[in-house]
Image: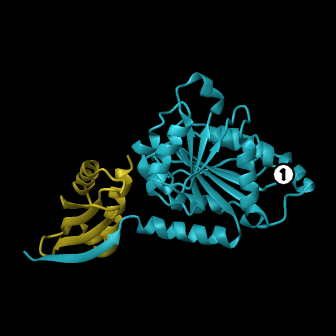
């Protein structure tokens, strides 16, 4: 018996990360702000996107890639608010999106006209932290019905993120959530984090989120014209399904 | 939760290095798993044992070394060159 030992030393995530680097290069070259929205299930990612598309649709060209385990319900909800492309990725059981799925979805999006690409990840604070999608930044949507200690329970996700949207602030009078405590826990695991306090339901605090999106896309390309908006709103887009 | 995806990627890396026809002769796959890699070692081990127990593999052993840090890599492969491959 002759056993041969082969040195490999290959990072398990290398192929994903190489694809993510290619995505990032493409997006950066076109000045697209790409935000990877991650959270627990039910934090309000989809509603935040619906409101954002409705309220900023006149100003910014936005596209959405949504990841869902089994349905394309989120994509259907979002598609009601925008004529821009909504790409649904049904992961078929997988708990995260990977860079290959994003690469495939990008093929159907006109990046040259785009200001913002939202990637609505699968609701899960564990696995999506391990997959770089080529985004500009990860945004954790953190609702006040959750425990303030989520950042301590899921440190990797908060370490990977750059922004935190504390959502459902309309419920603060009814729940024992301490915003300052939650922020302190988040900053403990990642001192670089910046926060937005919003209620996607009532619209409270969304102006700050919108100002951020405007500021981060200013000058990347001309603002969206009224004519362009009318045309884009005319038809409801079909959501493509990429099964894995 | 994503350990099966990781395990499948490990199998792909093994195939990349030795080729499909040699996979039945892989005896051991050396892995480095960092404590902050986001991977639960016991779960990854279970997934790997499942995958390595079925074709094209024939019972290769996962050998896992845990380290501090966030490293996650395949460090080596052991292949038996004389075991018949059918």
Q: In the current view of this chain or complex, which residue is farthest to the top?
A: A174
Q: Is residue A8 left or right of residue A236?
A: left
Q: Is residue A164 left or right of residue A218?
A: left
Q: Colour of chain B?
A: yellow
Instruction: Decide: is A242 above or below A23.
Output: above
Q: Position of residue A11 (x, y in %)?
A: 36, 68
Camera sees residue A195:
yes
Residue at 25% of width from left, 64% of height from top? B31
Residue at 24% of width from left, 77% of height from top? A7
Q: Colour of chain A?
A: cyan
Q: In the current view of this chain or complex, which residue is farthest to the left?
A: A1
Instruction: Decide: is B34 above or below A87.
Output: below
Q: In the current view of this chain or complex, which residue is farthest to the right?
A: A227
Instruction: State the residue in front, A118 or B18.
Output: A118
Q: Is residue A50 left or right of residue A25?
A: right
Instruction: State the residue in front, A87 or A57.
Output: A57
Q: Quadrant of the N terminus of chain A?
A: bottom left
Question: Callout 1: few (<14), some (14-19), or many (20+) C-alpha neighbours within 10 Å?
Answer: some
């Amino acid at each position: 018996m002759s056993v041969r030992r082969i040195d490999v030393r290959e990072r398990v995530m290398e192929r994903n990360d190489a694809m993510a680097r290619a995505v990032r290069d493409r997006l950066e070259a076109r000045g697209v702000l790409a935000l990877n929205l991650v959270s627990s299930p039910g934090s309000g990612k989809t509603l935040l996107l619906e409101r954002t598309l409705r309220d900023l649709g006149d100003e910014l060209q936005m596209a959405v890639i949504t990841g869902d385990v089994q349905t394309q319900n989120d994509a259907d909800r979002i598609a009601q608010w925008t004529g821009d492309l909504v790409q649904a990725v049904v992961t078929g059981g997988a708990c995260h999106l990977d860079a290959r799925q994003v690469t495939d979805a990008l093929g159907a999006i006109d990046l040259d006209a785009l200001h913002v690409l939202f990637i609505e990840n699968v609701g899960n604070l564990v696995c999506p932290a391990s997959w770089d999608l080529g985004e500009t930044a990860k945004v954790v949507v953190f609702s006040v019905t959750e425990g303030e200690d989520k950042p301590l329970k899921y440190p990797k996700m908060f370490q990977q993120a750059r922004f935190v949207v504390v959502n459902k602030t309309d419920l603060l009078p009814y729940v024992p959530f301490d915003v300052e405590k939650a922020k302190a826990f988040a900053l403990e695991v990642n001192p670089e984090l910046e926060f937005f306090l919003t209620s996607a339901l009532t619209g409270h605090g969304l102006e700050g989120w919108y100002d951020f999106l405007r500021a981060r896309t200013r000058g990347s390309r001309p603002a969206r014209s009224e004519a362009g908006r009318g045309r884009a709103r005319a038809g409801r887009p079909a959501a493509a399904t990429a099964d894995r | 939760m994503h350990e099966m995806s990781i395990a499948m990627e490990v199998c792909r890396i093994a195939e990349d290095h030795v080729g499909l026809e040699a996979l039945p002769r892989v005896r051991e796959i050396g892995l480095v798993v960092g404590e902050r890699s986001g991977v639960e070692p016991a779960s990854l081990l279970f997934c790997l044992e499942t995958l390595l127990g079925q074709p094209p593999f024939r019972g290769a052993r996962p050998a896992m070394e845990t380290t501090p840090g966030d490293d996650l890599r395949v460090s080596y492969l052991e292949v038996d060159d004389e075991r018949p491959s059918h």
